[in-house]
Amino acid sequence: MRRCTGTASKPSVLIPRAFAAALFATLTTAFAFLPTSVHASGRPEARDPKLEIFSWWTAGGEAEGLAAMFDIYRTKYPTVQIINATVAGGAGSNAKAVLDTRMRGGNPPDSFQVHAGHELIDSWVLEGKMEPITFVFRDNGWLNAFPRDLIDIISWKGEIYSVPVNIHRSNVLWYNKKIFTDNGLVPPTTFDQLVKFCDMLAGKGITPLALGDSGIWASVHLLESVLLATMGPARYKGLWTGSTPWDGGELRTALSRFATLLRYANTDHATLSWDAAAQYVIDGKCAMTVMGDWVEGYFKARGFTPNKEFGWVPFPGTKGTFMMLSDSFGLPRGAPDRDAAVKWLTMCASREGQDAFNPKKGSIPSRTDCNRALYDVYLQSAMDSFRSDTIVPSLTHGAAAAEGWVNQVQDVISLFACDLDVEKATAGLVAAARKYVR
Ligand code: GAL
C-alpha cells in the first residue's frame, strides 16, 4: 500500500517541491520592490502594463483553457504583457503554499485562481486580503447572469469577492469504453456493483481503478464521493455544518468502502499525478478513474473522445446529486496592476471568456446564458445535471470547508491509506470537525 512502503512516500515527493516553492516565493518577494526600468533622467520610467495571473493550470485541457482566455485578453489589450505564473500540482497542492508566502509577504499577483466558497472567504476575504469586486458585475449588468447560490458563496457582507469562471463536478466515474465493452460491463450504478466489476476486472489482470495521489488530495477526492454515496446529499452536507455527526456508523462504512477501493488501484498511485492516472485510462492500463471533470478536458486534449472512447456516470450511489466546485479569480489588495487585473476579471466574467475557456477546460460555464452549442456531449449532460440535481459542495476543492479543515482531513487520510485503521481515522476526523465546525 502507498506511503507506508517508503518507496514513494509523501514527504519524499513534497518536501523538495515545497522547499523550492518557498524559496521561489521568498526571492520574488525580496526583489519585488526593485524598479523595473529607470529613465536617463534618473526617474523610474512609466512601466508597461503587466498582468500576472497565478494558477495551477499546467495539465492538458486546463492549460489550453487558460491560454484561450489569454488570447482574448491579448486581442483586447495588446499592450498588456501577460505573465502566466503557474505552479504545477493538482488542486493547488503546491501553488497554495507559494501564494500564501507571496500574499503574506506583500507580493500578490494581479489576480489568482481560488475556489469559490470557504477557500476564498475564510483564507483571503476574512483576512482582509481582497478587494470587493461587486462593481465588475454591477457595471456590466451581470448581477443576474450567475446562479444566486454561487454568488452567495463568493460574497461577504453584501459584497462579491471573485469572478467564478466555471463550475466543475467532482463526483464522476470515468471509464474506458473498450475495456467495458470487451468485458461485457455496463456503467455501475451502485457501490456493490462497482466492487463486483472491480473484482471481475482484477481477476482478469486488468487494474480496475486509476488513482494518482502523489498529492493526497486525489485520495480525499475519491473519499468525498464515497461519503456522498454512503450518506446521501442531506447528511453529507450536514458534515460541514455540524448537523451530521462524524462518529456515526455511516462514516465508518464510508471509510471501509474507501479502503476497499484503494485495494483496486494501480500500485504506483502514490507516485502519480491526477493526469498521469488519467493517462492510464486512455492507454487501457486501467479501466476507470474517479476524478473531477477537468479530466474530461485532459482526455480531449489527448484526443480521447467522449462517448466514443470514454464514458462517464455519476459516482455509483450519487445519481441525482452534483458535487460542485468553482474556480474563480479575485482582486488581491495591492495588486501591482489593478487596472489590468480589473480588465482580466471582466473578461473572465464575460460570456466570450467563459465560452472560450470552459469547452477546453472540461467545465461548464458559471454564467447561465452561455452558448450550449459550443459544449460537447459530456458538458451538455453536466449542464443538465447542474440544473436538475441536488447541489452539494466539494470538500477537496474549497467549497465545503475552510482550508485548515481540508488539510486536517488530508492528514488523517494520509495515515489511513497506510494503516486502514477505521477507528483511528474516525477519531482524527471527529477532532478536525470539533475544531472547525461553526
Ligand atoms: C481543482 C481545480 C480544477 C483543476 C484540478 C486539477 O482544484 O478546481 O480546475 O485544476 O484542481 O488540478
Image: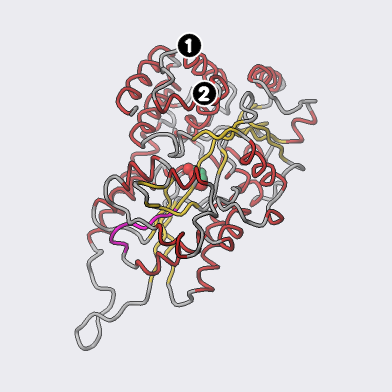
Q: Position of residue 52 (x, y in %)?
A: 39, 63
Q: Where is residue 366 in the image (x, y as percent from the top left)?
A: 55, 50
- The answer to whether residue 20 is visible is no
The disc placed on residue 249 is 1
Q: Which residue is more in the foreground, 160 or 289?
A: 160
Q: Which amino acid does label 2 sit on?
A: Leu
> At x 36% / y 15%, what residue is drawn?
427
Q: Is residue 361 left or right of residue 45?
A: right
Q: Which amino acid does label 1 sit on?
A: Gly
Q: In which quarter of the image is the C terminus?
A: top left
Q: Quadrant of residue 106?
A: bottom left
Q: Is mark 2 on a helix, strand or loop?
A: helix
- The answer to whether residue 368 is visible is yes
* Residue with the most extreme bottom position: 41
Give the CA separation, mark 1 to mark 2.
12 Å
> At x 34% / y 24%, what residue is drawn?
432
Principal secondary structure, stretch drawn in magenta = loop
Q: Where is residue 99 in the image (x, y as percent from the top left)?
A: 34, 50
Mark 2 surroundings: few (<14), some (14-19) or many (≥20) residues within 10 A: many
Q: What element carries label 1?
A: helix
**Magenta residues?**
329-335
Mark 1 surroundings: few (<14), some (14-19) or many (≥20) residues within 10 A: few
Q: Which residue is more in the foreground, 22 or 126?
A: 126
Q: In which quarter of the image is residue 382?
A: top right
Q: In which quarter of the image is residue 63?
A: bottom right
- Determine if the magenta segment contains residue 118: no
Residue 31 vertical placement versus 214 (above, below)? below
What residue is shown with label 2?
227
Specify which label sits upstream in the sequence, 1 or 2: 2
Q: In this view, does 381 lie to the left or right of 113?
A: right
Instruction: Report if the beta carbon of the residue with label 1 is closer than 8 angstroms to ligand 1.
Output: no
Q: In this view, does 13 lie to the left or right of 368?
A: left
